[in-house]
Image (cartoon, grey):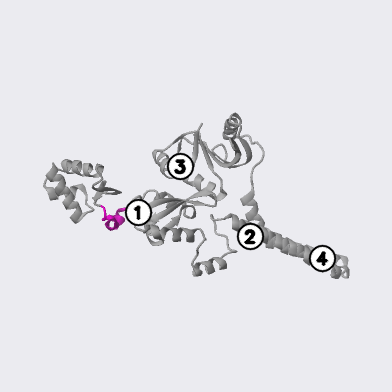
Amino acid sequence: MVDNRDKVLQIVRMKGPLLPSQINRELNTNLLFASAMLSELVDSKVLKISHLKVGGSPLYYHQGQEARLQEYAKKLNEKDYRAYELLRQAKVLRDRDQEPLIRACLREIKDFAVPLEVNFDNNVELFWKWYLLPNEDVELLVRQRLGLDRPRAQAVEEEQARTIPHAGQMTDVLLEKKLALARKVLSEKVESTVSEKRKEREEAPKEREKKVEEKIKKEEKGVKKEETVLSAETFVDRGEPNDKLFKKIKVFFDENKIRILSHKIIRKETDIEFTIEIPSAVGKLPYFCKAKDKQKCTDGDLSAAYVQSQSKKLPILFISTGELTKKAQDILRNEFKSMTVKQL
C-alpha cells in the first residue's frame, strides 16, 4: 500500500490535476482501489481535491498545480462559466454589485472564487477574489470597488454618469441626489413664479390664467419622473394589514418585545419586509427583517435578503415558516455568519 501511495503521488505530481480513472489506468489497478488511495492522500493533506466535477468525479492535484484547474473550466455549466470569466477578468468582485444569478454562481465555483469579508463603514461586506490573485494586490482592488482608490479614467466615467441612475443599483448617494434635484426644481419654480408675477399683473385675467396653467403642467411633467422614482423607493406600509403572515410575525415580535418601525408587503401573505428595533443589553438596535411564508427557503432567498440589508446598512433578521435547504444552511454557516435566522 505504501509503495502504491508513493506511486500515486508521483503520478499526480507529474500529470495532475487528474481524475481517479486516469490514475487507475496508470496504476493498472481497479478504480475502487485507486479512489481509496486518493481519498487517504487527501485526508492526510498530501493531495488536494477539486469542487469541480468532470463526469461526476472530482480532480486530484498537488499543491502548486492550482493554475492548471483552469484547463477544466469549460466543464462548468454555462451560468457558472459566465461567473468564472467575470471574476477571472475583474480579479475582485463586490458581491452586492452583482446580479442575483452571478452571486449564486460565485458560491458554486469554489475552486476559483475565494470569499472575503471586508469591514467597511461599520459593516461587513462580502467580496470575491480570483483564486490566483496575490494577497498583496487584493487591498488595492477592494478599495477601488469601494470607490476609495479609483483609477483616474474610472473616476471621470463615474463623474459623467453621476446623474444617470442604474436599475437595481439605487444607492443612498444617488437617492440623496434625486432629492436634491427635486428640491432644486421646486425652488426654481418658486423663483420663476415670483419673477414673473409683476409681468402677469399687466396681462388680461384670462390670458394670465392660461399661461399659469400651461407653466404648471410643463414643470409638473418635468419632475413627474423623479417624483415617481422617489415614491416607489420610499413607499412603506404603516398600518396593520389583514394579512396572515403579518399577524403571525406580529405575535412573534410582541413576545420578544420587538418594535416594528415600518413594514412593506412584497407579496400578500408570503413575503414582508420590516424595519424593526430589537432590545439588547446596550439598548434598542435597528434591524432589517425579511419574513417569508415558504416551505423551503433557498440560498437565493438568503442571498437576496443579505444584499438588501447591506444596501440599508443594517444587520439582518431572516424569519421563515419553513426550513432552509442544505445549500442555504451551508451558505449561512460559511458566508453569512452575521445573519440571524429564525424559523417559526
- Using the image, tell me which numbered label, if any, was put on residue 177: 2
Measured in 3D between alpha carbons, the distance from the residue under mark 1 to the one under mark 4, in whole angstroms, is 63 Å
Nearer the viewer's eye, disc 2 or disc 4? 2
Q: Secondary structure at mark 4?
A: helix
Asked if disc 3 and disc 2 are in contact, CB closer than 8 Å, the reply is no
Q: Amino acid at mark 4?
A: Val
Which segment did they paint magenta? 63-76
Q: Residues within 10 Å of mark 1 (few under 14, many from 20)?
A: many
Q: Secondary structure at mark 1?
A: loop
Q: Amino acid at mark 1?
A: Phe
Residue 72 lies in the magenta-colored region: yes
Measured in 3D between alpha carbons, the distance from the residue under mark 3 to the one under mark 4, in whole angstroms, is 58 Å
Asked if disc 1 and disc 2 are in contact, CB closer than 8 Å, the reply is no
Mark 3 or mark 4, earlier in chain: 4
Considering only vertical position in the picture, is 321 above or below 157? above
Q: Which residue is mark 1?
A: 112
x and y, in percent, of residue 227 in the image: 67, 56
- Using the image, tell me which numbered label, if any, was put on residue 337: 3
Considering only vertical position in the picture, is 192 above or below 244? below
| Residue 138 shown left or right of residue 197 in the figure | left
Asked if disc 2 and disc 4 are in contact, CB closer than 8 Å, the reply is no
| Residue 2 shown left or right of residue 199 in the figure | left
Measured in 3D between alpha carbons, the distance from the residue under mark 2 to the one under mark 4, in whole angstroms, is 26 Å
Mark 2 or mark 4, earlier in chain: 2
Q: Amino acid at mark 3?
A: Lys
Mark 3 or mark 2, earlier in chain: 2
Mark 1 or mark 2, earlier in chain: 1
x and y, in percent, of residue 201 in the image: 88, 68
Measured in 3D between alpha carbons, the distance from the residue under mark 3 to the one under mark 2, in whole angstroms, is 33 Å
Q: Is residue 5 visible?
A: yes
Asked if disc 1 and disc 4 are in contact, CB closer than 8 Å, the reply is no
